[in-house]
Amino acid sequence: MVEWFRILTTNNMEYIKLYNGVQMPTLGYGVFLVSPEECERCVSDALSVGYRLIDTAQAYQNEEGVGNAWRKAGLKREDLFLVTKVWISNNGEEKAAKSIDESLRKLQTEYIDLLLIHQAYGDVFGTWRAMEKAYRAGKVRAIGVSNFQAGRFFDFAHYVELKPMVNQLQCNTLIQQTGIEPIHAEFGTKVMAWGPLGGQGVDGIVKSEALTAIGAKYGKSAAQVALRWLTQRGIVAIPKSSHKERMEQNFDVFDFSLSDDDMAQIAQMNQHDTGTINFGDPQFVKYLIETYG
């Protein structure tokens, strides 16, 4: 059974508990493909709406914008959940350690709430050792991986001392990642969904007739139903928008619950269970290693 529970706060957010006890909001704001110039404004808007989880990465080149935004928002650091990722060019124990300190500087924080390995290639075991040290030193509250598909995830999780607390994957109503669920369960790993409303080869979620029909019963849009389906399963969703009105709509998903029949109907929509990007494709791996390794 997925463990999730509601914590009543000013924004009525829901949280999941990671296996080390850290509580993580089930809805956040992602800044993938948000330009460094626009990032500070977008994150400021997201924080004003009520988002408290912000997902960035070293490769996005906008960590400084995130840091500037949250500092100017006047928030207490403990009320914010910052996520970033170690890029493949920083893999390896020594380089990763330096990059973690650089991310801390750019984010203007003494600790990162969740640190992920961004891609499953390069010296990921050396990177993980650096992350474990950062975790034990209090620089990081939780550690995990991103884009690790089933076989690669099992191999990695089997050998590391601290098991990944989160695996961030392409996940939405059309890409449900059901096949990897038993492996995640074996290690106590939670899913964080990038592309929760589509993108990267997935279209039709926000205009889905099926989701629109379900949403009509609750006075919600197809997009809101899609996000609620994820959060109700205990999956962390990080939708992205540069428009504050859309941010507000995406955030307004905790005042209703989908019925069991609704959940079952949406489960039938699965089309590309493991995603539209084959992270194990030799040509893709070759590109990553030769370009960034």
Image: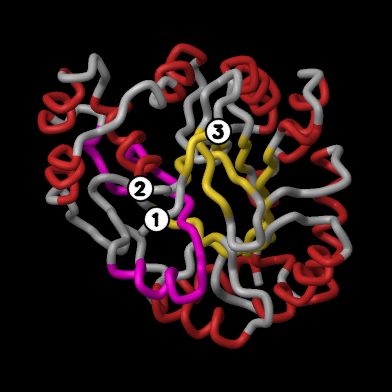
Residue 16: x and y in percent read 52, 47
Quadrant of the snapshot with the N terminus: bottom left
Q: Residue at x 74, y 79 (%)?
A: 126
* Cβ atoms at labels 2 and 3 below 8 Å apart: no
The residue segment tinted magenta is 179-205
- Inter-mark Cα distance, 3 to 1: 16 Å
* Cβ atoms at labels 2 and 1 below 8 Å apart: yes
Of the residues shown, which amino acid type is indicated by label 2?
Arg
Q: Earlier in the sequence, mark 2 or mark 1?
A: 1
Residue that mark 1 sits on: 2
Residue 46: x and y in percent read 59, 22
* Cβ atoms at labels 3 and 1 below 8 Å apart: no
Q: Earlier in the sequence, mark 3 or mark 1?
A: 1
- Inter-mark Cα distance, 2 to 1: 7 Å
Residue 275 lies in the magenta-colored region: no
Residue 289: x and y in percent read 58, 74
Q: Is residue 230 left or right of residue 100?
A: left
Q: Is residue 197 left or right of residue 189?
A: left
Of the residues shown, which amino acid type is indicated by label 1?
Val
Residue 178: x and y in percent read 28, 63
Residue that mark 3 sits on: 7
Residue 181 lies in the magenta-colored region: yes
Label 2 sits on a secondary structure element that is loop
Residue that mark 2 sits on: 233
Residue 120 in the image: above or below residue 224: below
Of the residues shown, which amino acid type is indicated by label 3?
Ile
Residue 157 sits in which quadrant? bottom right
Q: Closer to us: mark 2 or mark 1?
A: 1
Q: Residue at x 61, y 17 (%)?
A: 45
Quadrant of the snapshot with the C terminus: bottom right
Label 3 sits on a secondary structure element that is loop
Q: Is residue 136 left or right of residue 203?
A: right
